Image (cartoon, grey):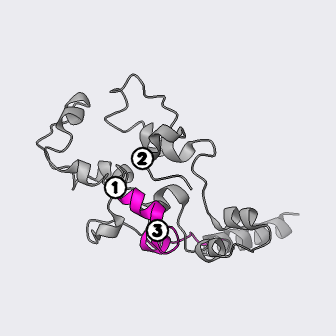
C-alpha cells in the first residue's frame, strides 16, 4: 500500500507546486477597461472618496479625521506600506507598487471591489451568454454587497488606525445613501 501511496503523493505535490497547473491567479487590467462600457458609473466613481483614497494619505488632507485616529496630519503617508492595502488598487497583486506608481492604480478602483477582471471582462461584455451570472462568478467577478465582505476588508480592517474612531462603525455600506462613496448603482 505504501508503494502506491508515496509515488502518488509525490506526483500530486509536484503538480501542485507548478504554478498555474490548476488555476492561475486572475490579473488586474485597470479601470479604463471598465470605463468603455460603464461611462456613467466611471464618471461618478471618479468623484467618489474611493477614487481619491490615495490622495487622503497626503499631509494636511482630512486633518481632523487623522487626529481622531491618532495620526499626525502633517505626515505624508503616501510611502507607508501599511496604508496601501486600503488606499490603492491591487497592492502587491500586480497593480500599484512604489516602483510603478501609475495613477490608474491610485485609489480604490473597480477591480479592488469587483475582482481582477482579466478572465471575466470578455464574458461580462457578452449580454447573451447562457448562465452568464454563474460563468462570471466562476471567472472571478465579485458582487461586493454579497455579505459585505468586500467592504469590510478596509472599513473594518483590524490594522486600520480608524477602527476605534467612529462609534457608528457598523454602517450598512449597501444603503443607497452611501452610494456617492463608491459609485452610482446601476
What residue is rendered at 62% in x and 64% in y? Answer: 140
Nearest to N terminus: mark 3 or mark 2: 3
Instruction: Spot the residue most to the right.
Output: 1
Distance, label 3 to label 1, CA atoms, is 13 Å
Secondary structure under tag 3 reads helix
- How many numbered callouts? 3
Q: CA distance from mark 2 to mark 1?
A: 8 Å
In this view, the residue farthest toward the top is 167
Q: Looking at the image, tell me whether mark 3 or mark 1 is earlier in sequence order.
A: 3
Q: Position of residue 99 (x, y in %)?
A: 26, 70
Magenta range? 23-47
Residue 39 placement (x, y as % from top left): 46, 68
Which disc number belongs to residue 47? 1
* Location of residue 123 by image quarter: bottom right
Q: Whole-Å distance between the Cαs marked 3 and 2? A: 16 Å
Q: Nearer the viewer, residue 164 or 122?
A: 122
52 or 10: nearer the viewer: 52
Q: Is residue 158 magenta?
A: no
Q: Dot 3 corresponds to which residue?
A: 39
Q: Residue at x 57, y 42 (%)?
A: 148
> Which residue is denoted by mark 2 in the rendering?
180
Pick whichever, 33 or 72, lies toward us.
33
Q: In terms of image quadrants, where is residue 8?
A: bottom right
User: In the rendered view, does 182 fall on the left or right side of 5?
Assistant: left
Amino acid at each position: 500500500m505504501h508503494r502506491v501511496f508515496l509515488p502518488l503523493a509525490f506526483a500530486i505535490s509536484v503538480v501542485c507546486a507548478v504554478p498555474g497547473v490548476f488555476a492561475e491567479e486572475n490579473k488586474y487590467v485597470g479601470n479604463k477597461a471598465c470605463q468603455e462600457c460603464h461611462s456613467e458609473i466611471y464618471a461618478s466613481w471618479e468623484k467618489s472618496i474611493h477614487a481619491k483614497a490615495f490622495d487622503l494619505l497626503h499631509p494636511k488632507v482630512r486633518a481632523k479625521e487623522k487626529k481622531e485616529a491618532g495620526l499626525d496630519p502633517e505626515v505624508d503617508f503616501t510611502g507607508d506600506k501599511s496604508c496601501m492595502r486600503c488606499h490603492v488598487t491591487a497592492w502587491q497583486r500586480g497593480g500599484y507598487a512604489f516602483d510603478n506608481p501609475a495613477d490608474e492604480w491610485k485609489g480604490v478602483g473597480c477591480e479592488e471591489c469587483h475582482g481582477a477582471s482579466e478572465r471575466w471582462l470578455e464574458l461580462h461584455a457578452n449580454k447573451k451568454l447562457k448562465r452568464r451570472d454563474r460563468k462570471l462568478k466562476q471567472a472571478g467577478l465579485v458582487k461586493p454587497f454579497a455579505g459585505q465582505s468586500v467592504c469590510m476588508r478596509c472599513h473594518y480592517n483590524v490594522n486600520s488606525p480608524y477602527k476605534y474612531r467612529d462609534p457608528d462603525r457598523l454602517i450598512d455600506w449597501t444603503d443607497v445613501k452611501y452610494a456617492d462613496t463608491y459609485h452610482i448603482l446601476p
